[in-house]
Amino acid sequence: MKNLITLLICTFFFISCGNSNQGNQNNAENIIKVKTIIGKTEKEIEKILGKPDSSEKVSPSNTPCKDEPCTKMFYQKNKFEIVYINGKSDWITINNISDFDCNSENIVLLGLPPTIPDFENLNGFRWSNIENISEINFSNNGEDKIDYIYIKSTTK
């Protein structure tokens, strides 16, 4: 009987240890599946993120916005900043995410598969041409947590 109880306790221990990663993966999906918000119109984004908190006009160089300013909208208390280029969500910044470790495995926070970054250093990580997204950057806040994520959908 003593052996049976020991076996059950060991089995429970190993099963619960094996599931610890699942919780992290479920939490990882809580930022956003980035492919649901790239290349969308303002109306489509509003259905996903809600009404914008504010907006402004911006004119980044080397974009169509240089000659005619593009709209930049802020959503969910500035968690999401989106620049609409040619009427579509293109440059996306995700803020207020310092709860997450700044490591290359956390690309899954965006609903993307684990992928080796094209560049990494102490300041962060960069992926180029991943899942038809031009560029994704994770910026380290200096404490090995993500300060912000910057995404360029199509315009470079």
Image: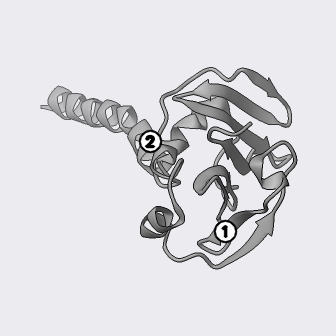
Q: Which amino acid type is marked by label 1?
A: Met
**Mark sitting on residue 112:** none
Q: Is residue 88 left or right of residue 141?
A: left
Q: Which residue is mark 2?
A: 25
Residue 100 screen position, x and y as percent: 64, 49
Residue 138 screen position, x and y as percent: 72, 41
Along the viewing direction, whichever of 105 and 62 lies nearer the viewer: 62
In percent of the image, x 63 and y 52: which residue is there? 86
Q: Which residue is mark 1?
A: 73
Q: Is residue 91 left or right of residue 36?
A: right
Look at the picture and state if 4 lies above or below 28.
above
Residue 73 screen position, x and y as percent: 66, 68
Q: CA distance from mark 2 to mark 1?
A: 29 Å
Q: Are marks 2 and 1 in contact (CB under 8 Å)?
A: no
Along the viewing direction, whichever of 109 and 71 lies nearer the viewer: 71
Residue extending furthest front?
Answer: 67
